[in-house]
Image (cartoon, coloured by chain):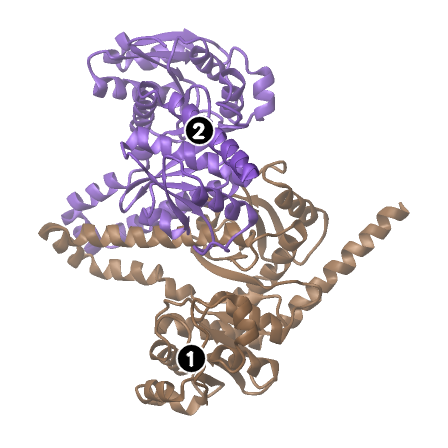
Chain colours: A brown, B purple
Amino acid sequence: VSDPLVISVDAMGGDHGPSVIVPGVAEAAAAGGSGKVRFLLHGDGQAIEAALARAPAAREFCEVRHTPLVIPMDAKPGHAMRRGKGTSMWNAIESVQSGEASAALSAGNTGALMAISRLLLRMVGGLERPALVANWPTAAGVTSVLDAGANVVCDADRLVEFAIMGAAYHRAVHGVPRPTVGVLNVGTEHDKGHDEVRGADRMLREQQFELAYHGFVEGDDIAKGTVDVVVTDGFTGNIALKTAEGLARFFRAELRRTLTGDPLARTGALIASGALRKMSARLDPSAVNGGPFLGLMGVVVKSHGGADARGVANAVRLAATLAAGGFVAEIAAHLGGRSGASGRSDTERSVA
Amino acid sequence: VSDPLVISVDAMGGDHGPSVIVPGVAEAAAAGGSGKVRFLLHGDGQAIEAALARAPAAREFCEVRHTPLVIPMDAKPGHAMRRGKGTSMWNAIESVQSGEASAALSAGNTGALMAISRLLLRMVGGLERPALVANWPTAAGVTSVLDAGANVVCDADRLVEFAIMGAAYHRAVHGVPRPTVGVLNVGTEHDKGHDEVRGADRMLREQQFELAYHGFVEGDDIAKGTVDVVVTDGFTGNIALKTAEGLARFFRAELRRTLTGDPLARTGALIASGALRKMSARLDPSAVNGGPFLGLMGVVVKSHGGADARGVANAVRLAATLAAGGFVAEIAAHLGGRSGASGRSDTERSVA
């Protein structure tokens, strides 16, 4: 790992490519100040240079790594893994693999990013696939929800791994020493739900991990901020997240329609515009942009494909925080502790 | 089935019991007018009479059926089924079983309501458990989402049954001749998701039912109103629904805080109050209150435990619509058609 911190960026991913990624990097670099973080920008050299020309202050923090190849947004993960060598996404992750960079960031194809990260960086301990975290703004702050879609089918052991990794992540990013963790379910009693969540609940209650296990939580506990970390399988997590995104867009559209609908409403909105703008900033999805993959032997952060420059800047800051914090080593230690602990307790039980 | 329409009501269920259920029935009776619907109110006679004394116009449409017994909101379904005889909920459903009423309504314990309904009314065809529908307000109108929590684990056949029943329900209530149906998934390509959704997608594409099959939909398609009916297992459906409820409450609280936060905001809100009130009415959850159980040999509607009188009135109207429409017979016919069709096609295949 290099010093100063180096972040490797796939400049071609997302809905807008370098025209949003580069200003986002520039915003993060300006906010970070004093040249502490450097960036490798992978992708089409000409397009990146054109974007850098409009953000000259960022120039000195950035090194352009040209490649003409990109992974299409609709590529299959398997195909991307077999044929992705030399693309901007591949090269961004390869810079982490080689030790040249401490974290990689991409707004590209999520499945491809997961597959290539797993191939090049490998998984911690006995894990099979990384888990994707969604940062969810709540009444109490931010809740970390995982898995947001990388693991469609999850058994109880997998959910316990999510709990351990999610707590380590939340601690690293939000500085909470013992984050509270809940398992998402259709009710809070121990006998509710299917075998997978009941098994995870049992393990988390019986074993001591570096987290405060709360028990089951329900869907409405996410927005309430009942716990710091919400654990669920990637199918349910993806659907809950996208359902919420859809509803948030619906509410914003309804509010806009309401406040522009007639002259009286427009006048009222104008007078209240200061407060409305503050609310809009508070609820801005770009403030919580950046979903890290947990369980990799390296830091990889996914930026939302539709994020604006401010969103990209937030994802860059998240990548820098995780890379600086020794977070991967912490996850490896905690998951190691888990296998040891469960082995020990089995022995104790068979002796007793 | 009696004429005029008789609706049997568990007056004791929900967070507020007769003090909200009875005014809700009164509101529905007043809106319906002309004495076409009659009500049997099951529960504590004294409490019901006290509530009726405050809604004298409803008195002539209502008959009180006293019982001192109730099913607690936290009772286990199995226990409620074995020990529930003679309670207000049991008696409300028994009135449908005996043919005295055409529909039952309760705001009580959902699991108990499902278990007792299944025991007393039995299921259509070879179905195992009823499915609970959530009516979801969208940009395009209302989407019917099922299962909202009755079936935690669902195989592909079960999801196909939900599609057929959901389409029949949507047609009965919203008058759409061939409702569009989507299966909720983490992506829209045919190879996305787990075996259960892929199997259901294949069957729905290959076989002709009385519905317009759209394919997979994602979480954000619910609020968009991409399809009329969204099909999912009860685990995912319950979590998506409660996540959305939590987010809706969060948004309402944020908006209230914003518009009362400082004098300028309060002034603006006052001027825009007409438009804001209209928005609030448009998004009022009580407007879509009332989740029917589909697949029973009778109409049973669950009212949200926290619904107000207006919400109860809407659930009553829904029960009346379903009871009047010959909806149970339609579901039986469609599900019969399905078994027949799949049997035929097996034979054809083995002959060919």
Report the front residue among A143 and B239.
B239
Judged left or right of residue A206, residue B317 is left
Residue where numbered disc 1 is placed: A11
Seen at 24% across and 38% down, the residue is: B281
Q: Where is residue B129 drawn, in percent x and y? A: 53, 28
Q: Give the structural element (helix, strand or loop) at label 1.
A: loop
Which chain is mark 1 on?
A
- Quarter of the C terminus of chain B within the rendering: top right
Which chain is mark 2 on?
B
Seen at 38% across and 24% down, the residue is: B330
- Quarter of the N terminus of chain B within the rendering: top left
Q: Residue furthest right?
A: A351
Report the front residue among B190 and A242.
B190
Residue B289, visible in the rendered structure: no
Using the image, tell me which numbered label, if any, was put on residue B337: 2
Say which amino acid is labelled 1. Answer: Ala
Judged left or right of residue A265, residue B195 is right
Seen at 32% across and 34% down, the residue is: B288
Q: Where is residue A321 drawn, in percent x and y? A: 52, 74
Judged left or right of residue A248, residue A145 is right
- The residues tagged by marks 1 and 2 sit, at their Cα atoms, a distance apart of 54 Å
Q: Residue furthest bottom?
A: A60
